[in-house]
Amino acid sequence: MDLALEGATGAATVNWGHLRQFRGPDAPSLLWLSVPSVSTRKEEDRTTLPPIALITQRRVWNTDPQDCEPLLGCKAFWEALRRSRLIIIFDRFLHDRLLKRLLDEFEPGRHLSLETMIVFAGKERKKECAPLVKDIQARLEKKRVNFHYLPDMMSTSAPFPHDRFAVTDGEFWHFGGSNLGLEQTLTAVSRGWSANEMGVKAFIEEAWAANDQQRSPLHD
């Protein structure tokens, strides 16, 4: 059943039924983000702490300002994102390089199951993020995806964000560092929680209503 996010201009329609479509692991798990080797630039998730040499190499790849390759993140998350119909990202420290990775994922020609994407971000890098947000919006509009971006969260006001999380249909993800696992150094991701049982719907509706910037952030 489609329900509206109250308080949003042009009320965003979300099929909250996707929160009941859980396709994660049988039990919650903790993943440490790494790479296979110091010479292989690929995402690899581990159930144990990675060797320091691999943490170091991953940092080198994710901090090079001249590097045009996508940031390395959580392999399991990106796999889940590509098959999801509802995606929610909640991160006050949302970085423009994370949006660049999302833009790469939504490039023309790639098949998407996505119907709705909601991104809650903060003020810290709002100007740097704005051009990429417009590019993402343009790409998702062509794919007929509902995209909603709220960029004005502050830790001192509702919804009082500190921790970062994401939702892929019915799975809830919690991030120790940057959202979607795009942290520079040692970081872990918790996955396998039921988004429906976590109370995601009620929280997102309340957080949206509490956001002072309910007009389209792209026209500030």
Image (cartoon, grey):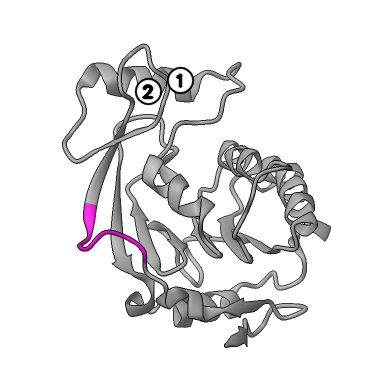
Query: Is 17 placed above or below 67 here?
Result: below
Badge 1 marks a residue whose secondary structure is helix
Image spot of residue 139 (x, y percent): 76, 50
Left or right of residue 127: residue 72: left
Q: CA distance from mark 2 to mark 1?
A: 5 Å
Residue at 64% x, 85% y is 6
Residue at 38% x, 79% y is 199
Badge 2 marks a residue whose secondary structure is helix
Q: Report the span colored magenta.
A: 23-29
Q: Which residue is mark 1?
A: 61
Query: 37 or 66: nearer the eye?
Result: 37
- Check residue 26 for magenta coloring: yes
What's under tag 1, amino acid-wise? Trp
Residue situated furthest right in the rendering: 219
* Quadrant of image for the N terminus: bottom right
Residue at 33% x, 14% y is 38
Left or right of residue 82: residue 131: right
Q: Which mark is residue 58?
A: 2
Image spot of residue 63 (x, y percent): 48, 22
Image spot of residue 93 (x, y percent): 51, 48
Tally of marks: 2
Name the chief secondary structure element in magenta: loop
Q: Are marks 2 and 1 in contact (CB under 8 Å)?
A: yes
State whether residue 5 appears in this view: yes
State whether residue 179 appears in this view: no
